[in-house]
Amino acid sequence: MDSHIHIQPPATESHATIFADLDAVLQQLHEWIDLTPVPDDETHHGIVSFGILVRATNQLRAIVTLLKANFWEDALILTRSLFELLLNAEELVHHCSDREHGAARFLLFSQLQRYLQWARLEEYQVASGRACFDYAKELAKIEESARRVFAPFAFFDKKGRPKWRVSWCSKNVAELCEASPNPMRPHQYRLLYSSGSDFAHATPTAALSTSQLYSSPEWEAFLRDAAAAEDRGLRLVASFALVFLGEIFTLLGTRVPTYRPNWVADTLGAIIRRILRTTAETPKAV
């Protein structure tokens, strides 16, 4: 078997129309998020809503950057993250009887996560010998205090061991999908978590995604297959990312005063349809 090196042409050249559309979306988001003064809203829901919109915008920026560099596989990982952001927004809007209380819980869980990140780093310092052993006793006292501060997320397992909840709403991703008012969520979950997990967890599929072994006579066929796979991957990621971003803005976009609700259905919808349009059979909407 021969091994050849093949450099894919820049995606910005092979899919110039798609990236023109994506850049137009990013420019619109830039105007809404970065250039528009957003009224102060010190409510928990106002803080969380704007935070989610900013995060969604930054996620799309990162996804487009990776797509432009021909890294659709890595962009798929971020698209899965954007999907989870949408699920959290749906939970906040549709399933919290008191949105302000739900947003307060969301913020408290964020603080818990920051504490746990700090605590794990300090525990690592002790384990690696960078901090004295007695410091571990101080960390234990701090955790006792943290379990009081973050009591809504503290519990003991069946063996009596102290544990922390893994989500702010006590639902995992699969449960959030089942609770979603959108019946496509479980299907999107299975698709994204099957493909996305391969790349997020560096499975053999991920390791071999950009290299193949083949005989010289198969070179042209391989190039055609590689180009087709790149095209499918890019269109899949770009369309899913825009669908998820559009749904997030549909839920929370009014937090930005210049946001136009019809933008998702009209402008963004037309862009998604163009991305999914191919010379072959037109795929079903994601």
Image (spheres, rainbow, N blue to C red):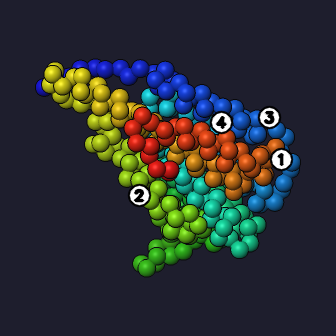
Q: Which mark is residue 257?
A: 1
- At 65% from the left and 52% from the top, the residue drawn is 248
Q: Amino acid at mark 3?
A: Leu
Q: From the image, tell me which residue sits under label 2.
A: 190
Q: Quadrant of residue 179?
A: bottom right
Q: Is residue 123 visible?
A: yes
**Residue in the foreground of this view, choosing between 180 and 162:** 180
Q: Is the residue under label 2 in contact with that under label 1 (CB below 8 Å)?
A: no
CA separation, marks 1 and 2?
36 Å
Q: Which numbered disc, 2 or 4, marks the residue that appears first in the sequence?
A: 4
Q: From the viewer's perspective, is 203 left or right of 153?
A: left
Q: Which mark is residue 25?
A: 4
Label 3 packing within 10 angstroms: few (<14), some (14-19), many (20+): few
Q: From the image, tell me which residue sits under label 3.
A: 35
- At 24% from the left and 31% from the top, the residue drawn is 212
Residue 227 image position (x, y, % from top left): 35, 28
Q: Amino acid at mark 4?
A: Val
For this orientation, the residue located farthest to the left is: 1
Q: Which numbered disc, 4 or 1, marks the residue that appears first in the sequence?
A: 4
Q: Which numbered disc, 2 or 3, marks the residue that appears first in the sequence?
A: 3
CA separation, marks 2 and 3?
37 Å
Q: Is residue 201 visible?
A: no
Q: Secondary structure at mark 1?
A: loop
